[in-house]
Image (cartoon, rainbow, N blue to C red):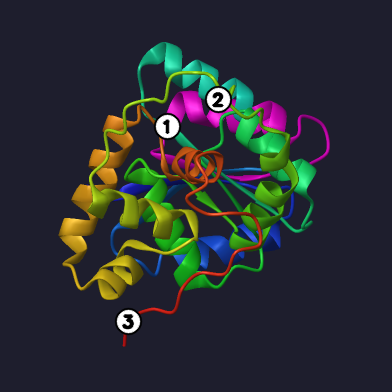
Amino acid sequence: MPVSVLLVDDQPLVRAGFRMILESVPHLSVVGEASDGREAARAVRSLLPDIVLMDIRMPGVDGIQATREIVEWAKGLGHGIRVLALTTFDLDEYAVEALRAGASGFLLKDVPPTELIAAIDLVVDGSSVVSPTVLRRLLDRFVPLIPTPEAESEPEADPLTNREHEVLALVARGRSNSEIADHLFLGETTVKSHVGSILTKLHLRDRVQAVVYAYEKGLVTPGEDAPPAAG
């Protein structure tokens, strides 16, 4: 079955542009549109889309409030509706509020069509996506504020294998599964299996939580560049 998508934006031309992009992809189907958060909440209840592309700044009920309402309603229903937040404004506060409201991703509207489609596929598959520039700034901003464990506390047992540590470090640097596969000379299916094992062992919901975990544990540090991919 195609992945069903609900478009939410107060500008008809923006919705038309996204519809044109998504309807060019065989496995995606735009099932409806909404011009504000209130319409979006009603449309979700009647259409039950797999994913909602949600504009953040809209008159009336904005995207943050609508995301919170939709996620809470879907959770109560037991239906896996995911929200991917989109905005024109490259502001960290929007990203933080969207993720707190329950969005599974945060992208800027100028994202290339191929990256938008890839992000939708990742979110539907249970992962999370955050614009790389926004994610780096958020980590630089918030990771130093995370309390460090007491020196005398018992060290936690490390459930990850050496290979899983390598994969986690590359995930934290923003590498995709295919890029990790190239770097570690692994198959992409193997990398996906490693990522799933990491999330399960560490009791993490998605890749965004995995990134924060990696920074907390010192596997990577804010401002650190990713190593070059294998040639």
- Most extreme residue toward the front is 152
The residue under label 3 is which amino acid type?
Ala
Task: Using the image as rendered, state which of residue 95 and residue 198 is in the foreground.
Answer: 198
Who's the residue at 64% across and 55% down the image?
222
Residue 148's disc is none
Question: From which residue to which does the magenta span run?
Answer: 37-66
x and y percent of residue 64 in the render? 70, 33
The disc, 1 or 3, on the residue closer to the chain's N-terminal end is 1
x and y percent of residue 192 in the render? 24, 53
Element type where label 1 sits in the image: loop
Residue contact at pointers 1 and 2, CB within 8 angstroms = yes
Q: CA distance from mark 1 to mark 3?
A: 37 Å
- Quadrant of the snapshot with the C terminus: bottom left
Residue with the mark numbered 2: 70
Disc number lying in front (3 or 2): 3
The disc, 3 or 2, on the residue closer to the chain's N-terminal end is 2
Residue with the mark numbered 1: 81
Element type where label 3 sits in the image: loop
The residue under label 1 is which amino acid type?
Ile
Who's the residue at 65% across and 29% down the image?
66
Q: CA distance from mark 1 to mark 2?
A: 8 Å
